[in-house]
Image: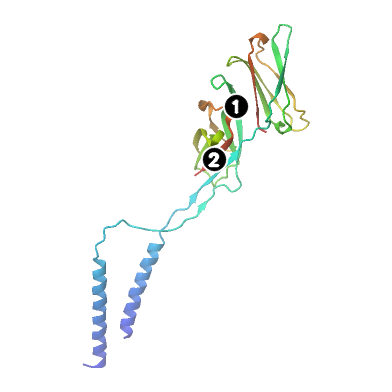
Protein backbone atom coordinates (compact mmCIF):
# COMPACT_ATOMS: atom_id res chain seq x y z
CA UNK A 1 0.00 0.00 0.00
CA UNK A 2 1.55 3.21 -1.15
CA UNK A 3 1.38 6.59 0.48
CA UNK A 4 -1.52 7.77 -1.71
CA UNK A 5 -3.64 4.74 -0.87
CA UNK A 6 -2.95 5.16 2.83
CA UNK A 7 -4.10 8.79 2.65
CA UNK A 8 -7.31 7.90 0.86
CA UNK A 9 -8.13 5.19 3.39
CA UNK A 10 -7.36 7.54 6.28
CA UNK A 11 -9.62 10.17 4.81
CA UNK A 12 -12.46 7.70 4.29
CA UNK A 13 -12.13 6.44 7.84
CA UNK A 14 -12.16 9.99 9.11
CA UNK A 15 -15.24 10.89 7.13
CA UNK A 16 -17.03 7.72 8.30
CA UNK A 17 -16.24 8.49 11.92
CA UNK A 18 -17.44 12.06 11.52
CA UNK A 19 -20.60 10.88 9.76
CA UNK A 20 -21.29 8.37 12.51
CA UNK A 21 -20.94 10.99 15.21
CA UNK A 22 -23.16 13.32 13.23
CA UNK A 23 -25.77 10.57 12.79
CA UNK A 24 -25.72 9.80 16.51
CA UNK A 25 -26.13 13.43 17.29
CA UNK A 26 -28.96 13.76 14.82
CA UNK A 27 -30.83 10.83 16.30
CA UNK A 28 -30.88 12.34 19.76
CA UNK A 29 -34.50 12.43 20.73
CA UNK A 30 -35.45 15.61 22.45
CA UNK A 31 -39.03 16.50 23.05
CA UNK A 32 -39.01 20.20 23.19
CA UNK A 33 -40.67 23.16 21.67
CA UNK A 34 -38.87 25.06 19.06
CA UNK A 35 -37.05 28.13 20.13
CA UNK A 36 -35.96 31.15 18.29
CA UNK A 37 -34.70 34.42 19.43
CA UNK A 38 -34.22 37.82 18.00
CA UNK A 39 -34.56 41.46 18.63
CA UNK A 40 -36.69 44.01 16.87
CA UNK A 41 -36.93 47.72 17.23
CA UNK A 42 -40.08 49.11 18.86
CA UNK A 43 -40.37 52.22 16.79
CA UNK A 44 -42.64 55.04 17.84
CA UNK A 45 -45.19 55.76 15.13
CA UNK A 46 -45.38 59.37 16.32
CA UNK A 47 -42.30 61.16 17.50
CA UNK A 48 -43.57 64.66 18.09
CA UNK A 49 -46.64 63.96 20.21
CA UNK A 50 -50.33 64.67 19.78
CA UNK A 51 -52.65 67.29 21.15
CA UNK A 52 -56.05 66.77 22.73
CA UNK A 53 -59.10 68.92 23.17
CA UNK A 54 -62.49 68.30 24.72
CA UNK A 55 -66.09 68.97 23.93
CA UNK A 56 -68.63 69.01 26.71
CA UNK A 57 -72.34 69.27 27.12
CA UNK A 58 -74.58 69.65 30.11
CA UNK A 59 -75.90 66.36 31.35
CA UNK A 60 -78.82 65.98 33.72
CA UNK A 61 -77.61 62.44 34.39
CA UNK A 62 -74.18 63.62 35.40
CA UNK A 63 -75.59 66.81 36.94
CA UNK A 64 -72.99 68.97 35.29
CA UNK A 65 -70.91 69.27 32.17
CA UNK A 66 -69.80 65.92 30.87
CA UNK A 67 -67.20 65.05 28.30
CA UNK A 68 -68.82 64.22 24.99
CA UNK A 69 -65.92 64.15 22.56
CA UNK A 70 -62.18 64.01 22.79
CA UNK A 71 -60.31 65.25 19.75
CA UNK A 72 -56.81 63.92 19.17
CA UNK A 73 -54.85 65.94 16.67
CA UNK A 74 -51.40 65.72 15.20
CA UNK A 75 -51.28 61.96 14.82
CA UNK A 76 -48.39 61.09 12.55
CA UNK A 77 -49.30 59.79 9.16
CA UNK A 78 -48.49 57.45 7.55
CA UNK A 79 -46.61 56.20 10.61
CA UNK A 80 -49.69 55.57 12.73
CA UNK A 81 -52.14 54.84 9.91
CA UNK A 82 -54.30 51.81 10.52
CA UNK A 83 -53.15 51.30 14.08
CA UNK A 84 -55.40 51.11 17.12
CA UNK A 85 -55.62 54.13 19.40
CA UNK A 86 -56.86 53.83 22.95
CA UNK A 87 -57.79 56.93 24.93
CA UNK A 88 -58.37 56.79 28.67
CA UNK A 89 -59.79 59.55 30.83
CA UNK A 90 -58.24 59.43 34.27
CA UNK A 91 -59.60 60.86 37.47
CA UNK A 92 -58.39 61.28 41.01
CA UNK A 93 -56.02 58.66 42.37
CA UNK A 94 -55.32 57.66 38.76
CA UNK A 95 -58.63 55.88 38.48
CA UNK A 96 -59.81 55.14 34.97
CA UNK A 97 -63.04 57.00 34.32
CA UNK A 98 -63.65 55.85 30.76
CA UNK A 99 -61.79 54.33 27.87
CA UNK A 100 -62.46 54.36 24.16
CA UNK A 101 -60.71 52.60 21.30
CA UNK A 102 -60.65 53.51 17.66
CA UNK A 103 -58.89 52.17 14.59
CA UNK A 104 -57.05 55.00 12.92
CA UNK A 105 -57.98 55.68 9.34
CA UNK A 106 -55.52 55.70 6.46
CA UNK A 107 -54.46 58.41 6.55
CA UNK A 108 -55.23 59.09 10.20
CA UNK A 109 -57.92 61.76 10.53
CA UNK A 110 -56.80 65.08 11.96
CA UNK A 111 -58.31 65.32 14.44
CA UNK A 112 -59.50 61.83 15.25
CA UNK A 113 -62.58 62.03 17.44
CA UNK A 114 -63.67 59.66 20.18
CA UNK A 115 -67.18 59.80 21.61
CA UNK A 116 -67.40 59.53 25.40
CA UNK A 117 -71.03 60.63 25.73
CA UNK A 118 -72.29 57.29 26.97
CA UNK A 119 -69.73 57.27 29.76
CA UNK A 120 -71.24 60.26 31.61
CA UNK A 121 -67.85 61.52 32.75
CA UNK A 122 -67.99 64.89 34.46
CA UNK A 123 -65.53 67.29 32.87
CA UNK A 124 -64.46 68.48 36.29
CA UNK A 125 -63.43 64.98 37.31
CA UNK A 126 -60.92 64.49 34.49
CA UNK A 127 -57.41 64.94 35.81
CA UNK A 128 -55.31 63.21 33.14
CA UNK A 129 -55.65 61.72 29.73
CA UNK A 130 -53.68 58.73 28.50
CA UNK A 131 -53.25 57.72 24.88
CA UNK A 132 -51.60 54.72 23.37
CA UNK A 133 -51.34 53.85 19.70
CA UNK A 134 -50.29 50.33 18.85
CA UNK B 1 -4.79 15.15 3.79
CA UNK B 2 -5.99 18.11 1.73
CA UNK B 3 -9.14 16.19 0.85
CA UNK B 4 -9.92 15.59 4.50
CA UNK B 5 -9.33 19.21 5.35
CA UNK B 6 -11.58 20.29 2.50
CA UNK B 7 -14.35 17.95 3.68
CA UNK B 8 -14.13 19.24 7.21
CA UNK B 9 -14.18 22.80 5.98
CA UNK B 10 -17.32 22.17 3.91
CA UNK B 11 -19.09 20.51 6.83
CA UNK B 12 -18.09 23.36 9.12
CA UNK B 13 -19.29 25.91 6.61
CA UNK B 14 -22.67 24.22 6.26
CA UNK B 15 -23.00 24.04 10.04
CA UNK B 16 -22.15 27.67 10.39
CA UNK B 17 -24.78 28.60 7.83
CA UNK B 18 -27.42 26.64 9.74
CA UNK B 19 -26.47 28.36 12.99
CA UNK B 20 -26.58 31.71 11.31
CA UNK B 21 -30.03 30.93 9.92
CA UNK B 22 -31.33 30.02 13.38
CA UNK B 23 -29.94 33.16 14.95
CA UNK B 24 -31.53 35.35 12.32
CA UNK B 25 -35.07 34.62 13.47
CA UNK B 26 -37.05 37.45 11.95
CA UNK B 27 -39.22 39.55 14.26
CA UNK B 28 -41.42 42.11 12.64
CA UNK B 29 -40.80 45.59 13.95
CA UNK B 30 -43.54 47.01 16.16
CA UNK B 31 -44.92 50.50 16.02
CA UNK B 32 -46.07 51.98 19.28
CA UNK B 33 -46.78 55.39 20.71
CA UNK B 34 -48.17 56.27 24.07
CA UNK B 35 -48.21 58.77 26.84
CA UNK B 36 -50.17 60.42 29.61
CA UNK B 37 -50.73 64.10 30.15
CA UNK B 38 -52.34 66.14 32.87
CA UNK B 39 -55.62 67.83 32.04
CA UNK B 40 -55.20 71.10 33.81
CA UNK B 41 -58.13 73.33 34.65
CA UNK B 42 -57.68 76.84 33.32
CA UNK B 43 -59.18 78.19 36.52
CA UNK B 44 -58.83 76.60 39.91
CA UNK B 45 -60.66 78.94 42.26
CA UNK B 46 -64.11 79.06 40.69
CA UNK B 47 -66.25 81.60 38.86
CA UNK B 48 -68.74 84.21 39.87
CA UNK B 49 -72.18 84.45 38.25
CA UNK B 50 -74.49 87.38 37.74
CA UNK B 51 -77.66 87.18 35.74
CA UNK B 52 -79.70 89.76 33.86
CA UNK B 53 -83.47 89.44 33.63
CA UNK B 54 -86.07 91.09 31.46
CA UNK B 55 -89.22 92.75 32.73
CA UNK B 56 -90.97 89.40 32.86
CA UNK B 57 -88.39 88.02 35.22
CA UNK B 58 -86.79 85.81 32.60
CA UNK B 59 -83.06 85.39 32.64
CA UNK B 60 -81.69 86.63 29.36
CA UNK B 61 -77.98 86.44 30.03
CA UNK B 62 -75.44 85.32 32.58
CA UNK B 63 -72.18 87.09 33.17
CA UNK B 64 -69.40 84.84 34.35
CA UNK B 65 -66.54 86.52 36.18
CA UNK B 66 -63.33 85.76 38.01
CA UNK B 67 -62.08 83.58 35.23
CA UNK B 68 -58.33 83.16 35.19
CA UNK B 69 -56.35 84.62 32.33
CA UNK B 70 -55.36 81.11 31.32
CA UNK B 71 -58.96 80.58 30.16
CA UNK B 72 -58.44 83.11 27.37
CA UNK B 73 -59.11 81.58 23.99
CA UNK B 74 -61.42 78.92 25.40
CA UNK B 75 -65.11 78.36 24.92
CA UNK B 76 -67.40 79.19 27.84
CA UNK B 77 -70.60 77.20 28.20
CA UNK B 78 -73.27 78.02 30.75
CA UNK B 79 -76.35 76.01 31.65
CA UNK B 80 -79.19 77.04 33.92
CA UNK B 81 -80.91 74.14 35.60
CA UNK B 82 -83.98 73.40 37.63
CA UNK B 83 -82.84 70.50 39.72
CA UNK B 84 -80.79 68.67 37.16
CA UNK B 85 -83.00 69.60 34.20
CA UNK B 86 -81.56 72.14 31.83
CA UNK B 87 -83.85 75.15 31.40
CA UNK B 88 -81.49 77.44 29.51
CA UNK B 89 -78.02 77.50 28.08
CA UNK B 90 -75.58 79.51 26.06
CA UNK B 91 -72.04 79.66 24.76
CA UNK B 92 -69.45 82.38 24.35
CA UNK B 93 -65.99 82.41 22.86
CA UNK B 94 -63.42 83.89 25.22
CA UNK B 95 -61.04 86.15 23.34
CA UNK B 96 -57.40 85.16 23.14
CA UNK B 97 -56.31 88.77 23.26
CA UNK B 98 -57.77 91.34 25.62
CA UNK B 99 -59.55 88.84 27.82
CA UNK B 100 -60.74 90.56 30.98
CA UNK B 101 -61.68 87.50 33.00
CA UNK B 102 -65.36 88.11 32.46
CA UNK B 103 -67.82 87.17 29.72
CA UNK B 104 -71.55 87.47 29.17
CA UNK B 105 -73.47 84.56 27.74
CA UNK B 106 -76.94 84.95 26.25
CA UNK B 107 -79.43 82.32 27.37
CA UNK B 108 -81.75 80.30 25.21
CA UNK B 109 -84.44 79.65 26.13
CA UNK B 110 -84.90 82.33 28.76
CA UNK B 111 -86.22 80.69 31.92
CA UNK B 112 -88.04 82.44 34.72
CA UNK B 113 -85.54 83.27 37.41
CA UNK B 114 -87.83 81.57 39.91
CA UNK B 115 -87.40 78.34 37.97
CA UNK B 116 -83.61 78.27 38.14
CA UNK B 117 -82.01 76.41 41.00
CA UNK B 118 -78.48 75.93 39.70
CA UNK B 119 -76.01 77.28 37.23
CA UNK B 120 -73.28 75.23 35.66
CA UNK B 121 -70.34 76.49 33.64
CA UNK B 122 -67.39 75.00 31.86
CA UNK B 123 -64.54 76.34 29.79
CA UNK B 124 -63.33 74.10 26.98
CA UNK B 125 -59.77 74.70 25.99
CA UNK B 126 -57.91 76.77 25.24
Apparent side of residue A21 relative to residue A54 in the rendered image (left or right): left
Tell me: residue A85, above or below residue A62: below
Q: Is residue A45 visible?
A: yes
Q: Is residue A91 visible?
A: no
Which mark is on residue A86?
none
Name the quadrant containing residue A128: top right
Count residues near mark 2 (Cα–Cα under 10 Å), then give few for <14, some for 14-19, many for 20+. many
Q: Earlier in the sequence, mark 1 or mark 2?
A: 1
**Residue at (26%, 92%) from the top-left corner?**
A3
Alpha carbon distance from label 1 to label 2: 19 Å
State the residue position of label 1.
A56
Apparent side of residue A23 relative to residue B31 in the rendered image (left or right): left
- Disc 2 sits on a residue from what chain? A
Apparent side of residue A30 relative to residue B41 in the rendered image (left or right): left
State the residue position of label 2.
A131
Name the quadrant containing residue B106: top right
Q: Is there one chain holding both mark 1 and mark 2?
A: yes
Apparent side of residue B54 relative to residue B1 in the rendered image (left or right): right
Q: Position of residue A105 (x, y in %)?
A: 52, 39
Amino acid sequence: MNRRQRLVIAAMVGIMVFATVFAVAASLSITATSLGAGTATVASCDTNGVTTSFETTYSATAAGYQVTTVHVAGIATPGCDGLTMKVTLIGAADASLAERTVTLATPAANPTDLNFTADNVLAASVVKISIVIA
Amino acid sequence: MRFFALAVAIVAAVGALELAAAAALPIPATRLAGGTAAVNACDTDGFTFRHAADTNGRITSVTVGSMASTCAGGTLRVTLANGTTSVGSGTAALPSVGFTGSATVSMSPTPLSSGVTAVYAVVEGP
